[in-house]
Image: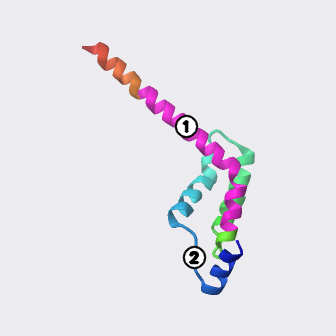
């Protein structure tokens, strides 16, 4: 991590990946935890989202935000798995309906 700090401070190199940054920004958005209402997740997402939006964000702070966001990342993964299951069930249901409609 020392090398990262020296690269950022001494050489002014930005080591943040833009795609990963925007993905994390979307995950940390507090509106994701409003329905169903999850007060602890909303509090954590508010705190981390505000840290992520700071103009002096560097890789070290970004890495810490990712570590702190672990509970929210798990919730997001669970929601994605549930959505995938629903999509698969919906497609399988349509196949069943198509099969018996002939």
* Residue 78 within the segment the image draws in magenta: yes
**Residue beneath label 1, please?**
81
Q: CA distance from mark 1 to mark 2?
A: 33 Å
Classify 17 as above or below 46.
below
Mark carried by residue 14? 2
* Residue 25 within the segment the image draws in magenta: no
- Boundaries of the magenta span: 61-90
**Quadrant of the rendering where the N terminus is positioned:** bottom right
Mark carried by residue 66? none
Residue 66: x and y in percent read 67, 58
**Does the image show residue 34?**
no
**Does the image show residue 15?**
yes
Q: Main secondary structure of the magenta part?
A: helix
> Which residue sits at x=36%, y=18%?
96
> What is the crowding at mark 2: few (fewer than 14 residues within 10 Å), some, or many (at least 20)?
few
Q: Quadrant of residue 101?
A: top left
């Amino acid at each position: 991590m020392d090398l990262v700090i020296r690269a950022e401070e001494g050489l002014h190199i930005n080591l943040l990946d833009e795609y990963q940054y925007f993905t994390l920004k979307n995950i940390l958005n507090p509106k994701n935890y409003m329905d169903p209402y999850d007060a602890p997740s909303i509090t954590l997402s508010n705190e981390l989202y505000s840290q992520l939006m700071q103009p002096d964000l560097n890789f070290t702070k970004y890495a810490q935000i990712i570590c702190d966001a672990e509970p929210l990342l798990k919730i997001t993964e669970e929601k994605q798995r549930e959505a995938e299951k629903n999509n698969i069930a919906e497609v399988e249901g349509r196949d069943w309906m198509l099969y018996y409609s002939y």
